[in-house]
Image (spheres, helix red, strand yellow):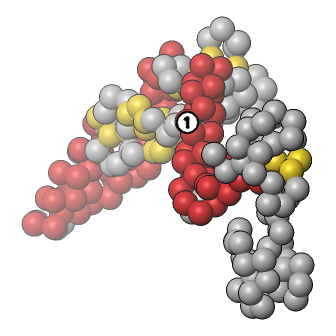
Amino acid sequence: MTKIEFTSNYDDLSTNEGFQFEFKCDRCGTGYRTSFQPYAIGKISGALDTASSMFGGIFSHASTLGERAKSATWEKDHDSSFIKAAAEVKGDFVQCPRCSAWVCREKCWNTSKGLCKNCSPDLGVEMAAAQSSRTVEEIWAHSKMAEDDRAMLKEESWREGVRATCPECGAALGEKTKFCPECGAKILQVVFCKECGAKLDPNTKFCPECGTKVGA
């Protein structure tokens, strides 16, 4: 008895008229349909069925014999056709030794590594995909940033310093401001020289370190 090796990555399209199979890649789903192999007894049986419905009698008996003949040989011919179909597409598929998946050789097999591309992806493709993904992330990050927030992130804003609460009433300050919106008190901000970075006292007009005019 001959054992038939088979996989799960195929669909059986066989009918009473003949045999045909469709093999698919486990990774990308690309399908390869094998050539149709006619089933001669199936055609004879179909003709006998038609004659039986028209005339009955001897034709009905012949139809029964035809069905018996078909049932006795269909499985044998089906197995034989499957073996031929598997041989027909054998060169188009390869089984990965790591994950055991059957993948198409054309698109999903890394020839240089001897593995499928799930187990050993093309590095160039992965690098391009990673760069594109990072670019998209940065686009979303910048799109969520309001213009006021952009201004707050400028170097000058960081050097000037920002208070979170009013020094007089303790009210929270939602943005950089000169006066408290609750009590009107002046917000004393820490100021730094834009030229040399030296810390300046409030109301200073010129930097005592480099002489740069404050607010220029």
Most extreme residue toward the left, as rendered? Answer: 54
Q: Is residue 2 left or right of residue 139?
A: right
Q: Is residue 119 above or below residue 193?
A: above
Tell me where residue 96 sits by quadrant: top right
Q: In this view, does 50 lie to the left or right of 35?
A: left
At label 1, counting other C-alpha atoms closer than 10 Å, the crowd grade (few under 14, some 14-19, many 20 or more) is few
What kind of element bears circle 1?
A: helix
Tell me where residue 173 sits by quadrant: bottom right
Please state which amino acid type lies under the numbered disc 1. Ser
Total number of numbered discs in the rendering: 1
Residues 184 and 52: in front is 184
**Which residue: 51% across, 15% down?**
91
| Quarter the N terminus occupies | top right
Residues 119 and 68: in front is 119
Mark yes or no: residue 63 visible.
yes
Residues 204 and 171: in front is 204
x%, y% of residue 24? Answer: 50, 37
Residue located beneath label 1 in the image: 132
x%, y% of residue 74? Answer: 43, 43
**Which residue: 79% across, 60% down?**
203
**Which residue: 71% across, 68% down?**
176
Q: In this view, does 46 lie to the left or right of 9?
A: left
Q: Is residue 142 left or right of residue 62?
A: right
Q: In this view, does 36 lie above or below 187?
A: above
**Which residue: 83% across, 86% down?**
171
Most extreme residue toward the top, as rendered? Answer: 112
Q: Is residue 130 above or below residue 216?
A: above
x%, y% of residue 3? Answer: 67, 29
x%, y% of residue 98? Answer: 78, 26
Mark yes or no: residue 95 visible.
no
